[in-house]
Image: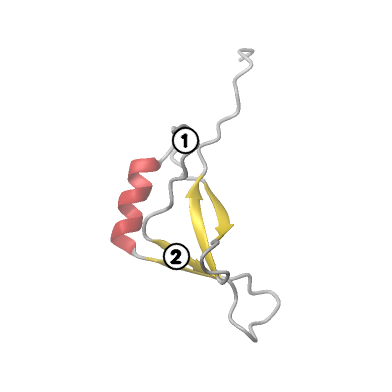
């Protein structure tokens, strides 16, 4: 499937806890070994890994990082 979502392995996000200050957007927990492996396997040609941050359907307080593989089309005028 061309549009299959690839979730970031080793990354776990949550919306802000109740009572958190307004400037807290959420929390991100990273399992280092899993995340490093995922990052190395999915780096683009510029060395970046881009994610979209999505709310999970099954847990309204949880967030998922989904690999964003969008690359603008080259117009050939380089």
Q: CA distance from mark 2 to mark 1?
A: 25 Å
Q: Quadrant of residue 41?
A: top left
If the image is split into quadrants, where does the N terminus sit? top left
**Residue 46 pos. (x, y %):** 47, 35
Nearest the eye: 77 or 25: 25
Please, which residue is most extreme toward the top here? Answer: 77
- In the picture as drawn, the residue positioned furthest to the front comes out as 58
Residue 23 or 66: which is nearer the viewer?
66
Q: Mark 2 sits on what residue? A: 12
Q: Which mark is residue 46?
A: 1
Tell me if 64 is positioned left or right of 39 in this view. Answer: right
Determine the image quadrant of residue 57: bottom right
**Residue 77 versus residue 42 in the image, above or below:** above
Judge by depth and name the residue closer to the eye, 51 or 46: 51
Residues packed near mark 2 inside 10 Å, few (<14), some (14 to 19) or many (20 plus): some
Q: Nearer the viewer, mark 2 or mark 1?
A: 2
* Secondary structure type for disc 1: loop
The spot of residue 21 in percent (x, y) is 67, 81
Residue nearest the viewer, comparing 29 with 60: 60
């Amino acid at each position: 499937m061309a549009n299959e979502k690839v979730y970031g392995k080793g990354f776990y996000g949550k919306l802000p806890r109740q009572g958190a200050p307004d400037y807290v957007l959420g929390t991100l927990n990273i399992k280092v070994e899993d995340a490093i492996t995922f990052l190395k396997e999915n780096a683009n040609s510029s060395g970046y890994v881009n994610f979209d941050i999505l709310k999970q359907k099954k847990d309204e307080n949880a967030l998922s990082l989904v690999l964003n593989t969008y690359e603008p089309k080259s117009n050939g005028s380089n």
